[in-house]
Amino acid sequence: MTFEEYYGIGESYYKNKEYAKALEHFKKCISIDNYYFCLEYIGLCYLQLKQYEVAARIFQKISEDIPELASSRINLGRVYLYQDLLEKAFENFIKAIDMEPDNEDAYFYLGVYFGKINKYEEAKSCYKKSLSINMEQSEAHLNLGICYYNLKFFNDALHEFHLAYNYDNQCLEARENMGLIYVEMNDYEKALDEFLFINRMQPDDVVNIVDIAHCYCQINDFYSAETWVKRAMTINQEDDFLITMLDMIKSSIEKED
């Protein structure tokens, strides 16, 4: 096979999140021709496979060999985020921004850094800057929504979660967060709409089922709540929390009767 064939197959595996297979093909590319972008992909595969020390060495080498390359700084910062080496992560994102002031990824991951240290105002600014460069980033809208959520700007958060889902209809985390905000706003009917939507996609998600049961309890529909808790217990029979919740629901039903 040619370099181009190995590279194309590697990219396809990477996009499908089959990182071990992608890594194998990018290594074949390197054996034919040592292009830096193949080495970057190899580093990204190791990052996704959680082999952080290997990934860090690769991105550090690229940064030394091609010091003007912002992407290697961003990826090195990402590795440091996973390793909780936060100051090193911050330094690399700032260097990337100095190199490329309009790099959406640099601002995005700088936002991730600020989010990890609970500086939501700073994180919000970073995500907004990233989105000003490219609006069609589902994850950036999601993370900006989470910032607004933590800052108690619920309507702004809902707007961002809507956008996150619109740009990626696999982003169920956006729908979950919308449901949680509606719970905070005591709008349990809308919360139920979100949680029931998620359940259709992920019927065995016990946390989601508990959210549904909780909403039914809040609107005093204890029979529906009981049904949903019993469904959760078919998935996780020995969960003490579910047993306690079911007992409380049964007690509420008895009081109603």
Image (cartoon, rainbow, N blue to C red):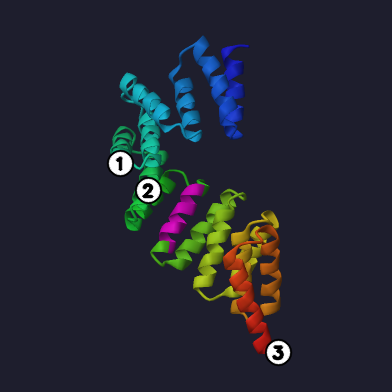
Mark 2 vs mark 1, CA separation in Å: 10 Å
- Residue ID for mark 1: 90
Mark 3 vs mark 1, CA separation in Å: 60 Å
Q: Is residue 99 visible?
A: yes
User: Is 105 drawn above or below residue 46 in the view shown?
Assistant: below
Residue at position x 49%, y 53% from top? Answer: 142
Q: Are marks 2 and 1 in contact (CB under 8 Å)?
A: no
To which quarter of the image does residue 195 belong? bottom right
Closest to the camera, between mark 3 and mark 1, is: 3
Q: Which residues are magenta?
A: 139-149
Q: Is residue 221 visible?
A: no
Counting from the top left corner in percent of width and height, residue 171 is at: 58, 51
Q: Is residue 118 left or right of residue 11?
A: left
Q: Give the amino acid at mark 2.
A: Gly
Closest to the camera, between mark 2 and mark 1, is: 1
Task: Give the label on residue 111, or none.
Answer: 2
- Residue ID for mark 3: 257
User: Is 116 drawn above or below residue 196 in the view shown?
Assistant: above
Q: Indicate yes or no whether the magenta region holds residue 143.
A: yes
To which quarter of the image does residue 196 belong? bottom right
Q: Give the amino acid at mark 1.
A: Phe
Quarter of the picture containing the N terminus is: top right
